[in-house]
Amino acid sequence: MLDIAICDDDSSHLTLLAAYTAECIQKHRIEASIHQFLHPDELLRSCEKRRYQIYILDIVMPMVNGIGVGKSIREHDREAFILYATYEPGFALQSFATNPIDYLLKPIDKQQLFKTLLLAVSKLETSQKCTCMVKTPEGIQVFRLSEILCCEYSNHKVIYTLAGARTVTTCVIKGTFPHHIEELLQDKRFVRPHVSFVINMDYVESFTKARFTLRYGHSVPIVAKRYSMVRDTYLDYQLAKGHVHE
């Protein structure tokens, strides 16, 4: 199930964008939920509790414009798709700082909106094929690698913290923690800063020599002898994604 957030301070435009989006997902049988926001602050507060995969944002709004909202989103989510829908062509260059999937001018061309939404969904489906399957006391759990904030080895079990701060705890694992996370570490998003922890670098908000601070207030320690490797790995990863300026 995808979550799509639409933010526009004009209620008529918000209703129209939501209607077009609903028509698109119904026509193409996409499982998605649409969330509407009249004020950017409402959206940003909601982002603290829920992760949206697609954002449709107006630009000229009170207090915080759409570019500012996009930058705030990018501080904690570099994978979501941002689509701007506005009367203002003059912000197109500024919008590149948030890596939008498209920049549409109002009045919105419905078919162009459909095309952009379907492109975003297609890209999401490709990225979501990478999954993790673990055995828990409740049964087999499957979740996307992109959902994993971090995992911790404790008492011969592995605790996965997922987007939204949900946790999944495995049964007692038979092998070692390094063996358990071997495939996970083959994904370039993940790094092991501590013998008992692996983190997803897409969820890092800040780091020091001692620890990473992740989304939702999670903190993961960095072992001193791993710091240089972890720092270089993290900076190289962000540089490759265009989020660090040399």
Image (tube, rainbow, N blue to C red):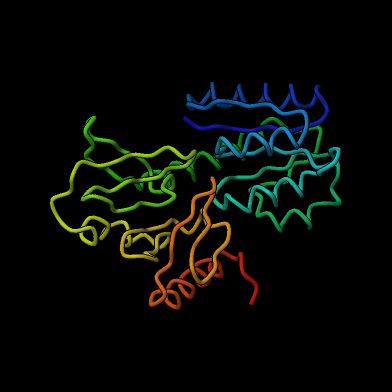
Left or right: residue 132 versus residue 105 is left
Q: Where residue 216 sits in the image (x, y, percent)?
A: 54, 45
The quarter of the picture where residue 14 lies is top right
Above or below: residue 238 compared with residue 134: below
Left or right: residue 128 versus residue 92 is left
Q: Where residue 196 sits in the image (x, y, percent)?
A: 31, 59
Residue found 49% across the figure and 64% down from its top: 211
Q: Where residue 172 sits in the image (x, y, percent)?
A: 18, 45
Left or right: residue 177 versus residue 59 is left
Above or below: residue 49 compared with residue 223: above
Residue found 44% across the figure and 58% down from its top: 220
Above or below: residue 180 compared with residue 40: below
Numbered-mark total: 0
Name the residue nearer the viewer: 70 or 140.
140
Residue found 51% across the figure and 32% down from its top: 2
Residue found 84% across the figure and 48% down from its top: 89
Q: Where residue 184 sits in the image (x, y, percent)?
A: 31, 56
Above or below: residue 231 compared with residue 4: below
Q: Quadrant of the C terminus?
A: bottom right
Name the residue nearer the viewer: 81 or 108.
81
Name the residue nearer the viewer: 28 or 181.
181
Left or right: residue 127 versus residue 94 is left
